[in-house]
């Protein structure tokens, strides 16, 4: 665990870059430092590998004050990835990845083995890439090598300074996904600096939001989204994500907002041929049977209709099955999802207090709702809403 | 005064008759250049490194070596001769002083131009200042150092032709012999090889200089670009 205690940084020109920073970076977690440029996020990160020194206060790694350690030795035990990648152009890829193990004077065979293993791990076939030079790789491939280099000496801590922000959007997404995948196996303590909130929400276990050298808010991505500490955080999270703030993000959505209000229904007296025609026209595989008083009577599936099709006198009321589960208007979406989930339902009717049918929750309508409310951040919030 | 026109065949026959002596001059010439430059590299590169470490050192070192270089070559050799006496040694020390500036300056510029991102990543992954110099900064400034060596070599090959004035050897001796005896064949026999040597040195060192630009280094195994088949 890394702990910052009352850290201040004042430059010679009087600029107070960090103001009484107290932070804790948990072991095995990805902690994202985020904030506008000049907020001190990089400065804070570089305290940990002694690229920056504090004017006062302590930086403790596993309880040890790093000011007592040799900075060169310390850095060899902390992985470091920077935005401009910084692969050495005169060394081939395997030399670049093996540079820290060589500094640590590992056995040559052990280095080769580790380098090959790491290249494969970050998605670069070592038989192809080992002997290439950095200028022969794309930006995304170079940063993969950058990540491999940071992992080479098996450090417990990895510092990443806006590692993906210079990449094109596709490579960036890929590398974010890879990082999450790698972290599942590696459980490193990763400190990741970014100014991109989407990136932070995607990869962070904990987000630390900074502004003007101060920590504004610390918490899980979900907590920060749901309970922004102040207007600055709200603005930083972005207007796009917050435009539906009142009705949706901070209040759990109700089934009434999510349901389809005009699902395909039929009166109980309809014949089977009519039912098939309706399903065909509306492209559905089942009909809800609702009577004139809007009371839900039951449901029929296409299979059931086809099964009994030969008997001409029958109506849908004869072949329908009762609807066992429904949810009351005013229930929350998580309640509805819970019911659908535990009973393996593909849909769930919503009824009012007089048992009148109001609408239908389907999986499609849930996804559609989430996509509308959280246009840029569907994956993390789905996790949040599943519970 | 000879009035007959000299032909190229006269020149060739003179060179072939005196090839042993000319070869000896050529080797002397080359030896002085190589030793002078070698000394300049041994001293100039560390001076360049020192310049890159300290702003004041840079000012002082570049100022002094610059003054050494602007002194006319003849004056420099004569002053050295007064101090060191006649001989090849004096010429080599002159060349050394003359070549210091391009080598020290280019080493300094080369070390300074290394992209800061390489330095940041080198430092960040745990290289000491010395390791950073040897493993990163120096390899990435080789092309600049080579360029300094190239400038110094071309100048040195020219300057060495005045070596006979301070008791040195080399192709200059043939040129002066020709001047004294009013024999243009001998002048050409000394001047043409000296000029060719300068041209060849410039070309060869130029190729080396490009080869040592490691910032865009490629592996031989790189996917070959589509080959254009020449149809005859």
Image: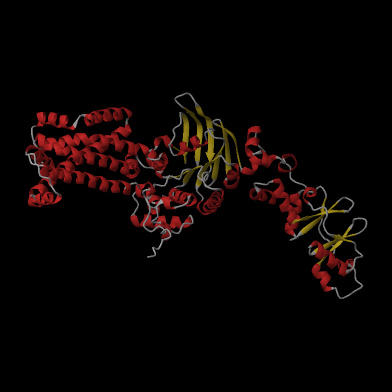
Q: Position of residue A172 (x, y in %)?
A: 54, 49
- Which quadrant: the C terminus of chain B? bottom left
Q: Position of residue A285 (x, y in %)?
A: 79, 64
**In the image: residue A366, left or right of residue B16:** right
Whether residue A230 is visible to the viewer of this picture, yes or no, is: no
Residue extending furthest top?
A14
- Which quadrant: the N terminus of chain B? top left
**In the image: residue A372, left or right of residue A130:** right
Please give the name of the residue rendered at 13% of the width and 28% of the height, measured from the top-left corner.
Answer: B79
- Between B178 and A22, the one nearer to me in the picture: B178
Looking at the image, residue A220 lies above or below residue A361: above
Looking at the image, residue B22 lies above or below residue B163: below
Q: Position of residue B51 (x, y in %)?
A: 30, 32
**In the image: residue A345, left or right of residue A77:** right
Please give the name of the residue rendered at 42% of the width and 50% of the height, measured from the top-left corner.
Answer: A135
Colouring of the image: secondary structure
Residue extending furthest front?
B3
Q: Position of residue A98 (x, y in %)?
A: 38, 51
- Between B68 and B201, the one nearer to me in the picture: B201
């Amino acid at each position: 665990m890394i702990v910052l205690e009352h850290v201040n940084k004042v430059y010679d020109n009087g600029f107070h870059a960090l103001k009484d920073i107290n932070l804790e970076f948990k072991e095995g977690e990805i902690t994202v430092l985020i904030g506008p440029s000049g907020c001190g996020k990089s400065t804070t990160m570089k305290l940990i590998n002694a690229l920056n020194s504090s004017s006062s206060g302590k930086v403790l790694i596993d309880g040890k004050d790093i000011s007592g350690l040799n900075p060169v030795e310390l850095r060899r035990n902390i992985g470091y990835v920077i935005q401009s990648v910084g692969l050495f152009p005169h060394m081939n890829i395997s030399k670049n990845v093996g540079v820290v193990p060589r500094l640590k004077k590992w056995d040559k065979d052990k280095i080769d083995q580790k380098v090959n293993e790491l290249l494969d791990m970050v998605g670069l076939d070592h038989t192809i890439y080992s002997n290439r030079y950095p200028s022969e790789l794309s930006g995304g491939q170079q940063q993969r090598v950058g990540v491999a280099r940071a992992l080479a000496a098996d450090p417990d801590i990895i510092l990443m300074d806006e590692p993906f922000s210079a990449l094109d959007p596709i490579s960036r997404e890929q590398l974010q996904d890879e990082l999450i995948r790698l972290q599942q196996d590696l459980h490193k303590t990763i400190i990741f600096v970014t100014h991109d909130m989407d990136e932070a929400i995607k990869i962070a276990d904990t987000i630390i939001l900074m502004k003007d050298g101060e920590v504004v808010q610390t918490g899980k991505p979900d907590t920060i989204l749901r309970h922004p500490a102040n207007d600055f955080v709200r603005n930083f999270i972005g207007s796009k994500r917050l435009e539906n703030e009142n009705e949706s993000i901070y209040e759990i959505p109700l089934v009434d907002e999510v349901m389809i209000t005009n699902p395909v229904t039929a009166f109980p007296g309809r014949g089977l041929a009519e039912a098939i025609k309706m399903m065909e026209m509306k492209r559905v595989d089942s009909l809800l049977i609702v009577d004139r008083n809007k009371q839900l009577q039951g449901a029929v599936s296409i299979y059931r209709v086809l099964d009994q099709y030969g008997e001409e006198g029958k109506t849908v009321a004869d072949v329908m099955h009762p609807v066992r589960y429904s949810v009351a208007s005013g229930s929350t979406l998580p309640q509805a999802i819970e019911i659908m989930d535990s009973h393996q339902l593909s849909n769930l009717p919503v009824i009012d207090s007089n048992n009148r049918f109001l609408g239908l929750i389907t999986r499609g309508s849930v996804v559609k709702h989430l996509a509308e409310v959280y246009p840029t951040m569907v994956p993390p919030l789905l996790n949040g809403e599943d519970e | 005064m000879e009035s007959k026109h000299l032909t190229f065949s006269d020149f060739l026959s003179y060179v072939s008759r005196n090839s042993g002596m000319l070869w000896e001059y050529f080797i002397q010439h080359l030896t002085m250049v190589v030793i002078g430059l070698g000394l300049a590299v041994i001293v100039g590169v560390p001076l360049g490194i020192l310049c890159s470490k300290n702003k004041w050192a840079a000012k002082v070192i570049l100022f002094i070596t610059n003054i050494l270089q602007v002194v006319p070559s003849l004056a420099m050799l004569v002053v050295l001769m007064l101090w060191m006496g006649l001989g090849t040694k004096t010429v080599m020390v002159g060349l050394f002083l003359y070549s210091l500036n391009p080598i020290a300056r280019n080493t300094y510029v080369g070390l300074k131009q290394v992209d800061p991102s390489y330095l940041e990543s080198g430092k960040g992954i745990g290289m000491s200042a010395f390791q950073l110099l040897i493993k990163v900064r120096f390899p990435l400034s080789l092309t600049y150092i080579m360029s300094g060596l190239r400038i110094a070599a071309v100048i040195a090959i020219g300057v060495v032709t005045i070596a006979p004035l301070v008791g040195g050897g080399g192709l200059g001796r043939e040129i002066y012999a020709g001047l004294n005896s009013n024999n243009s064949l001998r002048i050409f026999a000394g001047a043409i090889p000296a000029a060719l040597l300068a041209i060849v040195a410039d070309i060869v060192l130029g190729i080396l200089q490009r080869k040592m630009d490691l910032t865009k280094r490629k592996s031989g195994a790189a996917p070959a670009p589509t080959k254009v088949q020449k149809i005859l």
